[in-house]
């Protein structure tokens, strides 16, 4: 896929660790389906990033297939978007070695995600965890991406990516496009258990998130347990983090405005509201889950997508990598 139409290029990565949640769906994936005609998009399952913390091999493998199946089931077209797996394109790690030599120890030491993950995995503070941001910079810079849709927690990594690119460019001349973070229009969905925190697919408390693959009973149960307040009025207000979050989720699935929601639940309790949110969530996910199940039974199809799209990605990646190799003085054969 040549960038002949001068479309801007978008790159994003997702780790195959934990189950994708309605936070990933409403905050990102759903919005990506509206980008596929106007941008040239690459969506990478970053399995090499995932092993910076211990993974069960069978789970890692299954989740890699699952993410691809979920993306397709959510409406991302594998012909229009380059959806592929990081370990299938060796140029990512090849570039990351080079970029490691242009990234400072001090810079990596300041990364808040590194500090956070090393305190949570004190028995496994490995070199991969430390150089994680350089691999991420390589993912992005390899494709000369213009925009990188990420959440707030990844902003520091994008800043570092920009610094590494600018440093390399200043030594060797224009090589990398300097990417911008792309803060999507998608909603920010918080944890159901601690509604001031972002909903996370790797939260140890399964009641804190709704997985895209949870069944109807689980979904209803999780919303019933969602943390709220003692106010008992459905409306958006400061300090009502739980209800605010549920209103956002309800609004995303129904298209209703806050005023419409307030009216609908006037005189009703939180129980009714939570049930309604659970129901609309489960009903909206049902067709996605059905398509997901169908795709997961067709591994050959998914593997064909992996293969075709990794070839498209590798073609683009090779151009940047050979430019970099030439500039740093590696002999070309
Ligand atoms: N670090 C990102 C996360 O944890 C995942 C990621 C890896 C990524 N490479 C990327 C995101 C490149 C955007 C672009 O969410």
Image (cartoon, grey):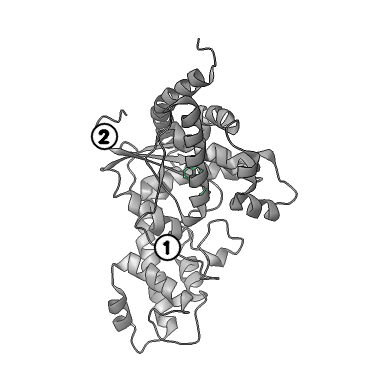
Q: Which mark is residue 188?
A: 1
Q: 241 or 83: nearer the eye? A: 241
Q: Position of residue 296 (x, y in %)?
A: 45, 44
The earlier-in-sequence mark between 1 and 2 is: 2
Residue 266 visible from this viewpoint:
yes
Q: CA distance from mark 1 to mark 2?
A: 30 Å
Q: 132 or 289: nearer the eye? A: 132
Q: Position of residue 304 (x, y in %)?
A: 41, 31
Mark 1 CB lies closer than 8 A to ligand 1:
no
Q: Residue furthest front?
A: 170
Name the residue that disc number 2 marks: 6
In this rendering, is residue 151 above or below 255? above
Cβ atoms under marks 1 and 2 closer than 8 Å: no
Q: Position of residue 303 (x, y in %)?
A: 44, 33
Foreground: disc 1 or disc 2:
2
Q: Residue furthest right?
A: 123
Q: 221 or 31: nearer the eye? A: 31
* Circle 1: element type: loop
User: Residue sitting at 34 percent across and 65 percent down?
Assistant: 252
Residue 52 visible from this viewpoint:
no
Q: Position of residue 207 (x, y in %)?
A: 55, 67
């Amino acid at each position: 896929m040549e960038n002949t139409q001068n479309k801007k290029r978008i790159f994003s990565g997702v780790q195959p660790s934990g189950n994708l949640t309605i936070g990933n769906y409403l905050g990102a994936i759903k919005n990506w389906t509206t980008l596929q005609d106007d941008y040239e998009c690459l969506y990478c399952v970053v399995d090499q990033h995932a092993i910076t913390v211990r993974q069960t091999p069978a789970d890692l493998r299954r989740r890699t297939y699952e993410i691809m199946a979920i993306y397709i089931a959510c409406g991302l077209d594998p012909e229009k978007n380059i959806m592929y797996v990081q370990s299938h394109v060796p140029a990512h790690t090849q570039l990351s070695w080079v970029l490691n030599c242009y990234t400072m120890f001090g810079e990596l030491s300041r990364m808040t995600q590194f500090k956070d993950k090393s305190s949570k995995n004190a028995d496994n503070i490995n070199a991969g965890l430390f150089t994680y941001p350089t691999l991420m910079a390589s993912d992005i810079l390899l494709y000369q991406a213009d925009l990188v849709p990420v959440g707030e927690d990844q902003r520091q990594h994008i800043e570092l990516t920009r610094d590494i690119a600018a440093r390399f460019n200043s030594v060797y001349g224009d090589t990398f496009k300097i990417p911008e973070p792309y803060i999507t229009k998608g909603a920010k969905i918080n944890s159901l258990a601690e509604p001031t925190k972002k909903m996370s697919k790797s939260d140890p408390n399964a009641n804190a998130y709704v997985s895209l693959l949870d069944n109807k009973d689980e979904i209803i149960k999780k919303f019933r347990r969602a943390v709220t307040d003692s106010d008992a009025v459905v409306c958006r207000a400061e300090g009502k983090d739980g209800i605010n979050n549920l209103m956002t989720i309800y609004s995303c699935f129904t298209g209703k405005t806050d005023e419409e929601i307030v009216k609908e639940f006037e005189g009703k309790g939180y129980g009714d509201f939570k049930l309604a949110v659970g129901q609309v969530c489960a009903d909206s996910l049902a067709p996605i889950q059905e398509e997901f199940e169908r795709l997961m039974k067709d591994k050959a199809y998914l593997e064909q997508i992996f293969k075709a799209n990794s070839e498209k990605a590798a073609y683009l990646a090779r151009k940047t990598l050979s430019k970099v190799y030439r500039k740093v003085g590696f002999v070309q054969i």
